[in-house]
Amino acid sequence: MESELFIEILQNVNSNNLFNPYTDLCELDKPNAPEIRTNNLRIFLDNIDRFDTILVGEAPGHIGARKTGLAFTSNHILKTAEKTWGMKGFEIATKKEYYKELSAHHVWSVLPRLVNPPILWNIIPLHPFKGEQFTNRTPNNLDHLTCNSAVEYFFNNTEFRKIIAIGRVAQKRLRRLGFDVEYVRHVSMGGSNKFKASMYELFEKYDGFEISEFGGKNRLRCIKDPKTCKACYETESMMRRHHLVDHGQESFTILDL
């Protein structure tokens, strides 16, 4: 994919009912927010060829991708995204961090625990709002038509071994575009547990470990219950989960992302 060409295509998508994170500005944004979000996207696109699986959602939410330019990724998750994907340079585009986005929280509670985590995208890359700017709505046919050139370019210029739709809206649209896609339950409306169960069926999971930064590298840390994990170091602090533990392995650096 030619990142700059795709960014140009995205920036040329305009609609009165869609907020374009890469050109538009709102009262919560820093003055250069569109440029920051565009650079976040550029970093993402420049690394996209390293991934063979993609999760595709419905559309950006007003707390998540609208603010960061990255699907299912709110401000407080940017550092986790860098570590999990092995990317650097993501920045916050808003004046404050604001609220945590629930869907993003559920998605990112899973991704760092996967051996080969997928990347994330939305079938509608712009934020659909309903009346007030800081609302969400389901994309309509006009939204899909408006974003069609960007969607087609993205999928025609990337090669993924597996495409997984998050929710029926994304699944339906991807099938219309001719893609053979798998489906996982959307995390909203009480679907987080089913989403997580499906993800752990589709992806290989690190048993009892997740990514943690230590000594300048991304390593594994234990997430097991210290009462049942005998190999864990004992600590006086209740914040044991913040400590790397030695399980007799030399595998801490296998996630040297």
Image (cartoon, rainbow, N blue to C red):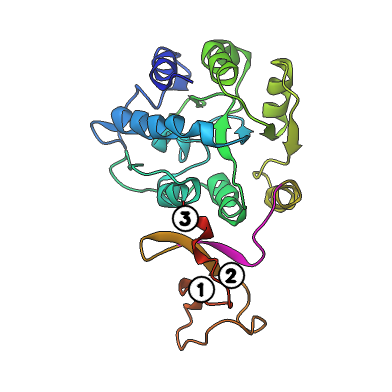
Overall secondary structure of the magenta section? loop
Identify the secondary structure beneath mark 2: loop
| Residue that mark 3 sits on | 256
Circle 1 — which element?
A: helix
Disc 3: CA contacts within 10 A as few (<14), some (14-19) or many (>=20): some
Tell me if I can see residue 160 in this picture: yes
One can see residue 135 in this view: no
Above or below for 177 versus 233: above
| Residue 186 image offset from top left, x and y in percent | 68, 40
The correct choice, above or below, for 125 with respect to 119 in the image is: above
Residue 165 sits in quarter: top right
**Dots 3, 1 in contact, CB < 8 A:** no
Give SS at disc 3. loop
Mark 2 → mark 3, Cα distance in angstroms: 19 Å
Q: Residue at x 28, y 43 (%)?
A: 95
Badges 2 and 1: C-beta atoms under 8 Å apart?
Answer: yes
Residue pointed to by mark 1? 241
Stretch in magenta: 203-212
Q: Is residue 28 left or right of residue 254?
A: left
Q: Which residue corresponds to the image point at 59% horizontal and 46% vertical from the top-left?
A: 117
Percent x, y of residue 156? 59, 16
Q: Amino acid at mark 2?
A: Ile
Q: Residues within 10 Å of mark 1 (few under 14, many from 20)?
A: some
Gap between marks 3 and 1, in whole Å? 20 Å
What residue is shown at x 73% (from left), y 16% (from top)? Answer: 178
Q: Which mark is residue 211?
A: none
Going from N to C along the chain, the mark reached first, 2 or 3, is 2
Residue 107 horizontal side relative to residue 61, left or right: right
Mark 1 residue type? Arg
- Residue 223 is marked as 2
- In magenta stretch: residue 209: yes
